[in-house]
Amino acid sequence: MIVVLKNKVEEEQKRQLIEWLEGQGVRTHLSEGEFSTIIGLVGDTSAIDMPLIESMSIVESVKRISDPFKRCNRKFHPDDTIVDAAGIKIGKGNFCVMAGPCSVESEEQITGIAESVKASGALMLRGGAFKPRTSPYDFQGMGGEGLELLRKAREKTGLPIVSECMGVSDLALFEDVDIIQVGARNMQNFELLKALGKVKNPILLKRGLANTLKEFLMSAEYIMAGGNENVILCERGIRTFDDYTRNTLDLAAVSMLRELTHLPIVVDPSHATGIARLVPPMALAATAAGADGLIIEVHNDPVHALSDGAQSLTPEQFADLMVRINKVREVVA
């Protein structure tokens, strides 16, 4: 349920109404936008007397939200959310490109790539320290050592870092990671999502490879319900009947999510296609579709990459792509 207040309501009146609503056994969330103020009610609202609230002089209207996701719902929070990660803003016109290798392999590799993507305009460094792999025989990442190398690259270049946490047991290692990524395979790891609701780090939540948008938003709701509202959604392709690409990039999801939620939305064209030559056109299409950012895999030697080399751009290819992305942004601004 949401309570829309009239314009220019005094702070004391808001406070009294919130106290009264919380006295009815629900939790409240205040969203103050440029043109409206909304009080969102979370919990069992079945006993709330809607006509009584509507009769109050400071109330414009009262509406029930039928969607199961509340906190991430645009009805609950009409204005776009801006997530601040180490001073880098994402959402509401703030466009962010995160770039780097699928896996951290060495200090020389991750630092060199960080320097090159920063020079091309990337605002954040992505890199996998823990790698969920389909085969148990594939490279699983460097773990805590990989995170330490990411920190060294951050110290040298100033780029905030993005890396994936695979489980609650590893969460303590991510305390100073600027954005914690939840991979597609963990989108419905509910114990992890609940634990991430208790941390301060912004969360990059990737859509599962076979999940609906409602399921995607419900996973975001898990994090936000725990108290962490700094969630960034990531469309990274879904599994369909087509087998020419790794996944099928659902760009319609960007527009649909924009209607459903106030959270920032970024796109991962690398995992969506699995083919390096398809990454640039899909990155440009995602930019034109209104994404708030991109997360792109870049490797200095893709042929010898320990994971996902086939979908990784070289630093030179990434530099060229960034020029084209900026041109698209100018056109659609």
Image (tube, rainbow, N blue to C red):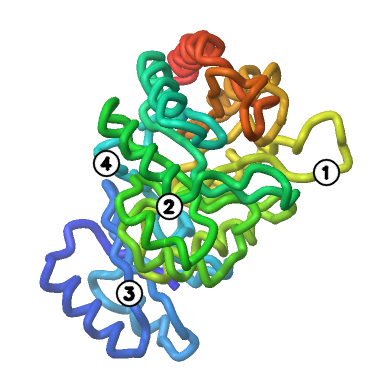
Judged left or right of residue 321, residue 302 is right
Q: Position of residue 97 (x, y in %)?
A: 44, 28
Answer above or below: position of 142 versus 37.
Answer: above
Which residue has dot 2 on it? 203
Q: Residues within 10 Å of mark 3 (few under 14, many from 20)?
A: some
Q: Evaluate if marks 1 and 4 touch, with contact meaning CB atoms under 8 Å apart.
A: no
Kindly identify which numbered label has been placed on residue 86.
Answer: 4
Answer above or below: position of 104 versus 47.
Answer: above
Please tell me whether mark 3 sits on a helix, a strand or a loop: strand
Answer above or below: position of 247 versus 281.
Answer: below
Which residue has dot 3 on it? 28
Q: Earlier in the sequence, mark 2 or mark 4?
A: 4
Please tell me whether mark 4 sits on a helix, a strand or a loop: loop
Distance between mark 1 and mark 3 Cα atoms: 40 Å
What amino acid is found at the position of numbered circle 4 in the picture?
Ala
Q: Which residue does the image show at 36% across and 43% down from the upper left?
A: 148
Please tell me whether mark 2 sits on a helix, a strand or a loop: strand
Q: Position of residue 270 (x, y in %)?
A: 63, 30
Q: Evaluate if marks 1 and 2 touch, with contact meaning CB atoms under 8 Å apart.
A: no
Distance between mark 2 and mark 4 Cα atoms: 13 Å
Of the 4 image quadrants, the one containing the N terminus is bottom left
Kindly identify which numbered label has been placed on residue 240.
Answer: 1
Q: Earlier in the sequence, mark 2 or mark 3?
A: 3
Please tell me whether mark 1 sits on a helix, a strand or a loop: loop
What amino acid is found at the position of numbered circle 2 in the picture?
Ile
Q: Closer to the camera: disc 1 or disc 3?
A: 1
What amino acid is found at the position of numbered circle 3 in the picture?
Thr
